[in-house]
Image: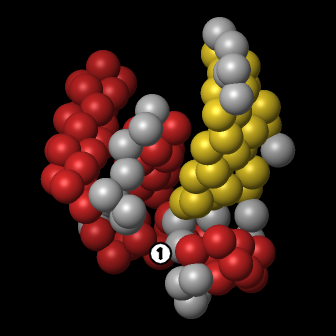
Amino acid sequence: MVQKEIGNAVVDVFFVGERTMRKLNEAFRNSSGSTDVLTFVYKDEDLYGELFLCPAVVAKNAQKFGCSFEEELLRVVIHAALHLAGYDHEFDVSQSEIMFEKQEAYLKEVEHHDG
């Protein structure tokens, strides 16, 4: 687990295997199978979040989408950060297009600065 504190926000990041991710996905999303990232957001006076990342699924998706593991990992971290910022694509599908556009725009911005 990695914990990062940003201002009054705290985000715990967990790297888990496919079996653990499958159990989390089934328990919290009623969805069968494993997934690449799950984001849990808890709000009191401050923001607290948990990210569960599954490197094995990220690697499979990178191969499937024809990109590097690093690019796909960055994509899912950006995706999770957007969830932490309040974007949702499952319960409010009206935000879906905006969220994914922002995700890809941020990814391009990071890649542009990385080179």
Q: Examine the image and state in which quarter residue 6 appears.
A: top right
Task: From the viewer's side, name the closer residue of 46 and 57.
Answer: 46
Quadrant of the rendering where the C terminus is positioned = top left
Would you name the residue on which mark 1 appears? Answer: 60
- Where residue 42 appears, as percent x and y from the top left, is 67, 40
> Quick one: label 1, few (<14), some, or many (20+) residues within 10 Å?
some
Name the residue at 24% across, 50% down. Answer: 95
Q: Examine the image and state in which quarter residue 20 appears.
A: bottom right
Left or right: 80 with respect to 24? left
Name the residue at 46% across, 44% down. Answer: 83
Residue 70 shows up from this direction: no
Looking at the picture, the colour scheme in use is secondary structure
Of all residues, the one furthest to the bottom in this rendering is 32
Name the residue at 70% across, 29% down. Answer: 44
Position of residue 19 relative to residue 6, above or below, is: below
Residue 19 shows up from this direction: yes
- Where residue 8 appears, as percent x and y from the top left, is 68, 14
Name the residue at 58% across, 83% down. Answer: 30
Of all residues, the one furthest to the front in this rendering is 44
Left or right: 48 with respect to 59? right
Of all residues, the one furthest to the right in this rendering is 1
Quadrant of the rendering where the N terminus is positioned = top right
Position of residue 72 relative to residue 36, above or below, is: above
**Considering the numbered disc 1 on the image, is that residue within a helix, a strand or a loop?**
helix
- Where residue 68 appears, as percent x and y from the top left, is 39, 56
The residue type indicated by label 1 comes to: Lys
